[in-house]
Amino acid sequence: MNIIYSAKTTFKALEQQVTRCQNSHSAKSLMILCCDANNYVSSDISRLLRGLSIPVFGGIFPGVIFNNHRYEKGFLIAELPWTIHVGIIKKISASETNLDEELEHILSDFLSVKTIFTFIDGFATRINSLIEALFATFGLQYNYMGGGAGSLSLIQKPCLLTNEGLLQDAVVLVGIVAPSGIGVRHGWKYISGPYKATSVVGNKILQIDYKPAFEMYKRIVEQHTNESLGIDNFFEIAKAFPFGINKLDTEEIVRDPLQVDNNGTITCVGEIEQGCYINVLSGQQKNLIDAAGEAVNEAFKDISIPPKNFVFFVDCISRVLFLDKNFTLELSNVYNQAGNLPVIGALTIGEIANNRKEYLEFYNKTSVIGCL
């Protein structure tokens, strides 16, 4: 199979390369991963995608991964050797969208597949509901891997690539017949808790232990840092102190505190269940770097035949921001563990995975590895 990375940011460069790829005799479908900094015009991308004669899927992300490098500009195209099955649900944040019914309509086309790529608008407000409905409808017979598309500007905009065009507030499910192995690790550790999330609306925490969420979080965090936490520097400090939701027999599910408003409400990437218990986590850079390598080993152990196509690496953009220049060590760790396989992937706003053994989850600050 052929994988192309280009540092060019113009729409013309993307159009020319996509056109060449769709005419390749070996390509039965295309996965396209683009960087948000390219600043494409949505109407141009939609026109290109709708005119393709080959199935396509992908997204626009804060960055893309190719082998042992990350890129904040350019695009990556993988010519896939598989005919894909695609299911799209639009307006997933709308309460009137019946996610269970939509998924039931899609399920019949996925009965023969083994792996499902799952790309979602990272700023949709019903992501957890979608994930729960997906697992309830599709079950444990598939491996899932993917993540949230979107922009670090925190502005929701069209970010999912499909043959229907560039979509916003949607999820794209892509089924392939190939088997895969999945590994999931994050490396964050407990420092305080548990605390009860006593007032929650979707992905917004209003109260923790019946007190304003920011007041409680600020008190906890400032016990573990020399800096004063405020609205203006919230994300810069909070990226090192995520929330953790306890799960049996596995690492905690991480929730990334994204921003705080003047009322002290904390917005996270992904929903938190009303009344659940949360811990505050922190991390050492070495633990996070080691965890990504452990995810590769876990993925290779999870597949019954040696993978021969590529390693798919979905890593949270906030891990990049936390590790800073040492993120290159995480990339190198994954690349070295992947052996001779190319590594492709994206820096995401939330990660999606399970391996036919565990509950399907929407993660934050986590490394997800798939090998095919």
Image: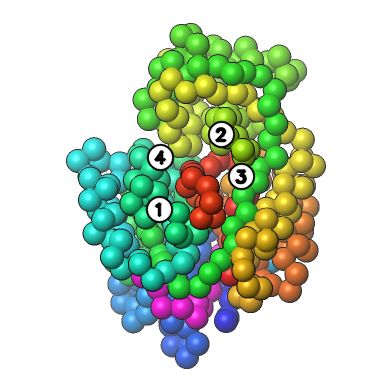
Residue at the spot 24% in from the left edge and 38% down from the top edge = 95
Q: Nearer the viewer, mark 1 or mark 4?
A: 1
Amino acid type shown at disc 4:
Asn
Q: Is residue 306 left or right of residue 359?
A: right
In the picture of the structure, the residue carrying the numbered disc 4 is: 128
Mark 4, secondary structure of its residue: helix
In the picture of the structure, the residue carrying the numbered disc 1 is: 139
Q: Which residues are magenta?
A: 73-85
The answer to whether residue 112 shows anywhere in this view is yes
Q: Nearer the viewer, mark 2 or mark 4?
A: 2
As drawn, the residue found furthest toward the bottom would be 25
Q: CA distance from mark 2 to mark 4?
A: 15 Å
Residue 220 in picture, x, y percent from top left = 64, 15
Residue at the spot 47% in from the left edge and 23% down from the top edge = 276
Crowd around label 1: few <14 · some 14–19 · many ≥20 (10 Å) = some
The answer to which of 245 and 365 lies nearer the viewer is 245
Quarter of image, res 172: bottom left
In the picture of the structure, the residue carrying the numbered disc 3 is: 366
Amino acid type shown at disc 3:
Thr
Label at residue 247: 2
